[in-house]
Image (cartoon, rainbow, N blue to C red):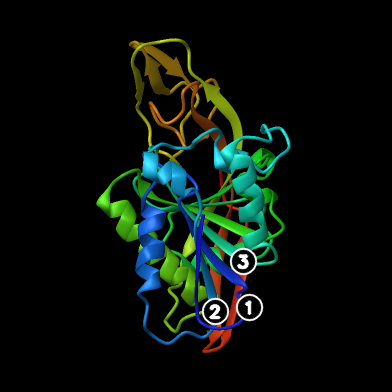
């Protein structure tokens, strides 16, 4: 694990890249931040997490680091010790952990619940959605004693994801008053992650719908070796892709609200969550 710092003092903000070795966009964002020479209002810690997996170009060495924050992972696994070290580095901090995905080209945020820093930070980020994974946090970085926000910067391995990752990191630092800049008012739909959509055994998989867009009951949303999968009831696809997971397409989700940022004055900003129509 590589740890660096911008500014002097004890950082309360952390940007993490490289949790997965096959997702280079976050590492590239961290490396670009290391060259930041503008005004710095708060110190920031920068972390490249799983260097060994990055060097191998693999998601992990022994176990998925973002599932290793639990005693269920073998004690001698490389990522088990790394999880302990990473938890120590982020303890007590507000954290942005940068990832990429095979499911959706546009950036979106992932949180475990809607507590701080989610309402304050997410509407200031260039994301199309927020996914609440509160019921699916076992073993993930969310288990650390810190305020964690994850972002998916775009499609894995693309130059666009790398550019998005840097922009997300910069706007996170603006939103947390670490660097100067203007925030942009956004409304971000919130989706609750639900049950997984299992894959039947097949050689070829297809997905016919877009993430975060409502699938109606009776609509064909995927296929396995040409056999169509039809929705028994309506849902919103979350992290849905043909090959992102070995044994599932992704998740059924519900749209549960909208994070809305409103500004009443130059230094007065409030954030609220409101329900939205299904």
Q: Which residue is mark 1?
A: 10
* Separation of marks 1 and 2 at Cα, in angstroms: 7 Å
Crowding near pointer 2: few (<14 within 10 Å), some, many (20+)?
A: some
Crowding near pointer 1: few (<14 within 10 Å), some, many (20+)?
A: few
Viewed as shown, does residue 160 lie left or right of 251? left
Residue at the (57%, 57%) spot, across then down: 149
Can residue 254 be seen in this snapshot? no
Crowding near pointer 3: few (<14 within 10 Å), some, many (20+)?
A: some
Q: Secondary structure at mark 3?
A: strand
Q: Nearer the viewer, residue 40 or 51?
A: 51
| 2 or 3: mark nearer the eye | 2
Viewed as shown, does residue 55 lie left or right of 196? left
Picture coordinates of residue 177, whole percent (x, y): 53, 80
Picture coordinates of residue 31, whole percent (x, y): 37, 64
Residue at the (50%, 21%) spot, across then down: 247
Q: Considering only vertical position in the picture, is 228 above or below 75? A: above
Q: Which mark is residue 43?
A: 2
Q: Which residue is mark 3?
A: 94
Q: Considering only vertical position in the picture, is 224 above or below 117? A: above
* Separation of marks 2 and 3 at Cα, in angstroms: 12 Å
Could you tell me which quadrant the C terminus lies in? top right
Q: Secondary structure at mark 1?
A: loop
Give the mark nearer the N terminus: 2 vs 3: 2
Residue at the (56%, 37%) spot, across then down: 253
Give the mark nearer the N terminus: 3 vs 1: 1
* Image marks 1 and 2: residues in contact by CB distance under 8 Å: yes
Displayed quadrant of residue 206:
top left
* Separation of marks 3 and 1 at Cα, in angstroms: 13 Å
Displayed quadrant of residue 21:
top left
């Amino acid at each position: 694990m590589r740890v660096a710092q911008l500014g002097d003092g004890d950082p309360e903000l952390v940007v993490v890249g490289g949790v997965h070795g096959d997702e280079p966009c976050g590492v590239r964002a961290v490396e670009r931040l290391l060259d930041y020479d503008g005004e710095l209002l708060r110190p920031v810690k920068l972390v490249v997490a799983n260097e060994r997996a990055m060097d191998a170009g693999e998601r992990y060495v022994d176990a998925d680091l973002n599932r290793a924050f639990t005693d269920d992972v073998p004690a001698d696994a490389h990522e088990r010790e790394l999880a302990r070290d990473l938890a120590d580095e982020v303890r007590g901090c507000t954290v942005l952990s940068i990832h990429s995905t095979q499911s959706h080209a546009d950036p979106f945020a992932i949180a475990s619940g809607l507590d701080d820093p989610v309402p304050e930070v997410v509407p200031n980020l260039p994301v199309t959605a927020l996914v609440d994974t509160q019921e699916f946090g076992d073993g993930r970085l969310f288990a650390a004693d810190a305020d964690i926000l994850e972002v998916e910067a775009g499609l894995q391995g693309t130059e666009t994801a790398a550019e998005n990752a840097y922009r997300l990191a910069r706007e996170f630092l603006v939103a947390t008053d670490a660097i100067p800049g203007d925030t942009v008012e956004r409304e971000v739909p919130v989706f609750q992650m639900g049950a997984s959509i299992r894959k039947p055994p097949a050689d070829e998989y297809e997905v016919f719908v877009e993430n975060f867009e409502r699938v109606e009951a009776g609509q064909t949303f995927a296929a396995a070796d040409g056999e169509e999968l039809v929705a028994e009831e309506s849902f919103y696809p979350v992290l849905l892709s043909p090959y992102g997971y070995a044994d599932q397409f992704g998740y059924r989700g519900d749209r549960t609200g909208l994070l809305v940022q409103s500004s009443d004055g130059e230094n007065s900003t409030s954030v609220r969550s409101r329900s939205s129509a299904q």
